[in-house]
Amino acid sequence: MKIISRVLQRCYMCSETHDVLIVEETQMTNYKGEEIVYSGVYEYCEYADEMFESEEMINVNRLKLIDVYRAKVGLLNSSQIV
């Protein structure tokens, strides 16, 4: 887990206001029959020792997953599609 930043906000995991870590973590999943490894971004609560994925993070992480898949099978990634 790599720490990207700290944000003072209300934590969704413990319901307290404190510095929530924004972290990047390597994820491995199976997508359309292919094993995909990508870096996902999450909020991490040190008090609850839990990660949370906001709606925006879900969208960003899904796009990263799909772009890695596309590169692996020889397709254009999202930035190359006009």
Image: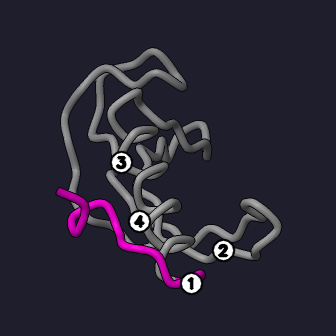
Quote the CA–CA distance across marks 1 and 3. 18 Å
- The answer to whether marks 1 and 2 mark residues whose Cβ atoms lie closer than 8 Å is yes
Question: Which residue in the protein does label 2 denote?
Answer: 36
Say if 6 sits above or below 59 in the image: below
Identify the secondary structure beneath mark 1. helix
Q: Closest to the observer: 66 or 12?
A: 66
Q: Nearer the viewer, mark 3 or mark 4?
A: 3
- Front of the two marks 2 and 4: 2
Q: Which mark is residue 72?
A: 1
Residue type (three-letter) at the residue carrying disc 3? Val
Q: Residue 43 placed where, x, y %? A: 41, 44
Front: mark 1 or 3: 1
For numbered disc 3, what is the local secondary structure?
helix
Report x, y in % for residue 53.
Answer: 48, 37
Label 4 sits on residue: 24
Counting labels gives 4
Q: Is the magenta stretch mostly helix, strand or loop?
A: loop
